[in-house]
Image: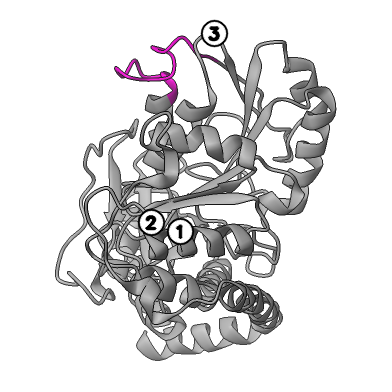
């Protein structure tokens, strides 16, 4: 079986050659953009120093945010360790832009599970709904695209924010490229120039050569323990966008009248600069690992979304496995190939913010870092696993051999 599996992987790698080449070209272009920003903002060792207290005049923080804005071709950016997760980052963004009586229009269908509590769909205290913000949803087309005519028709006088989710989340629809989002953003702005367009950019940064902010998004948000952190940033989130949006969000981040002028970090900023520098390469490694997983799954007769040679706009790889037993086997194999906690057995549990029990394989150096190889699955039909990350392709390949080895054992039983 081991020899057969290795032969299967070697065939899959040959088949993935054209995709790997395209990933490397994107890495080259994005790396150049990051390094150009470092050069323009004269990044130096003094920017790595820690700060404390209020953090007034924190040169490292301010330079890091300026570099982030430059990389995203945005007017301003927030990049802070104090943002605890991607969900927290999105919550701060939406709470900063929305007022009581405003409407939030969800233009990419039902949002990712954890955001439902922020909006108020699950009755959580402190939600936007409790603030008096109404939310409406426009579903994607059957092909998984933004239904722009319906979105334009749904925009009303009170629509203040139109929300677009780039990645698939726990759904089987395709992720949305910045170019596709750009067409939607232009249509939204034609209908309502004053509406803010917010993009959930989690899992999407540096996957393509462009970003949603290149196409007019008022804010693109994400977690720093996903793509942008390069596997080195220990915590935090980012929001890049227009000055009009970022100034309001900054007042929600801290306090009105204070905004982005305060916020210290005793840990220092070296890992944040270094993570941003590494991010284009790390994202490339994750994409290669995802494509390999897709091709091996296809050769074994499973459905992979996206397919191995399809264009990608996020690092998530969905594999439709069909039964709880196959999901558990795949997650166990992936966990056994992890550098941390390889000896643990993943079990489904009721994770906060999720509608169903979730099983997760995640042997990561940074807790919850999905730019590191991980895999999670809500235990509900069609029993698909959602894999993301890999700091290095070779470590990802090794873990995939464990995962598919366990899966084939269950299939053969």
2, above or below 330, in the image = below
* Image vertical order of residue 348 relative to residue 360, above or below: above
Front in this rendered view, residue 72 or 138? 72
User: Crowdedness of circle 1 by 10 Å Cα count: few (<14), some, many (20+)?
Assistant: some
Does the stretch in magenta take in 120?
A: yes
Element type where label 2 sits in the image = loop
Range of residues picked out in magenta: 119-134
On the image, numbered disc 2 is attached to which residue? 57
Compute the Cα span from label 3 to label 1.
Answer: 34 Å
Q: Secondary structure at mark 1?
A: helix
Which mark is drawn over residue 101? 3
Circle count: 3
> How would you rate the neighbour count of disc 3 (Cα within 10 Å): few for under 14, some for 14-19, many for 20 or more?
some
Q: Quadrant of the N terminus?
A: bottom left
Disc 2 packing (10 Å; few <14; some 14–19; many ≥20)? few
Task: Find out whether the residues at labels 3 and 1 contact each other: C-beta distance under 8 Å.
Answer: no
User: Is label 1 in contact with label 2 (beta carbons under 8 Å)?
Assistant: yes
Label 1 belongs to which residue? Answer: 62
């Amino acid at each position: 079986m081991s020899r057969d599996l290795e032969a299967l992987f070697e065939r899959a790698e040959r088949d993935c050659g054209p995709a790997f080449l395209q990933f490397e070209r994107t890495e080259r272009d994005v790396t150049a953009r990051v390094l150009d920003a470092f050069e323009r903002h004269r990044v130096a060792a003094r920017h790595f120093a820690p700060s404390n207290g209020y953090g007034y005049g924190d040169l490292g923080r301010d330079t890091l945010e300026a570099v982030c804005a430059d990389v995203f071709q945005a007017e301003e950016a927030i990049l802070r360790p104090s943002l605890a997760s991607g969900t927290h980052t999105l919550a701060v963004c939406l709470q900063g832009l929305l007022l009581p009586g405003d409407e939030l229009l969800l233009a990419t269908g039902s949002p990712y599970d954890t955001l439902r509590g922020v909006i108020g769909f699950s009755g959580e205290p402190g939600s936007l709904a409790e603030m008096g913000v109404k939310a409406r949803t426009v579903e994607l087309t059957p092909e998984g695209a933004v239904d722009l005519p319906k979105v334009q028709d749904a925009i009303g006088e009170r629509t203040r924010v139109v929300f677009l989710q780039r990645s698939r989340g726990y759904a089987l629809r395709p992720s949305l490229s910045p170019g596709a989002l750009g067409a939607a953003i232009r249509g939204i702005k034609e209908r309502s120039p004053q509406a803010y367009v917010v993009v959930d950019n989690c899992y999407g940064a540096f996957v393509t050569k462009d970003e949603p902010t290149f196409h007019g998004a008022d804010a693109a948000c994400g977690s720093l323990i996903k793509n942008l952190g390069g596997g080195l940033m220990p915590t935090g989130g980012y929001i890049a966008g227009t000055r009009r949006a970022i100034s309001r969000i900054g007042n929600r981040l801290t306090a009105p009248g204070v905004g982005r002028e305060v916020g210290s970090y005793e840990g220092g900023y070296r890992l944040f600069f270094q993570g941003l520098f590494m991010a284009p390469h790390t994202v490339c490694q994750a994409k290669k690992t995802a494509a390999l997983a897709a091709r091996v799954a296809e050769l074994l007769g499973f459905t992979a979304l996206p397919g191995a040679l399809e264009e990608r706009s996020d690092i998530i790889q969905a594999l439709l496995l069909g039964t709880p037993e196959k999901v558990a086997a795949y997650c166990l194999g992936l966990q056994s190939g992890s550098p941390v906690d390889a000896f643990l057995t993943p079990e489904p549990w009721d994770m906060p913010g999720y509608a169903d029990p979730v099983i997760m394989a995640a042997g990561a150096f940074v807790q919850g870092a999905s730019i590191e190889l991980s895999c999670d699955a809500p235990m509900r039909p069609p029993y698909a696993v959602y894999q993301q990350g890999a700091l290095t392709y070779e470590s990802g390949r090794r873990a995939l051999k464990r995962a598919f080895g366990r899966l084939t054992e269950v299939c053969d039983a």
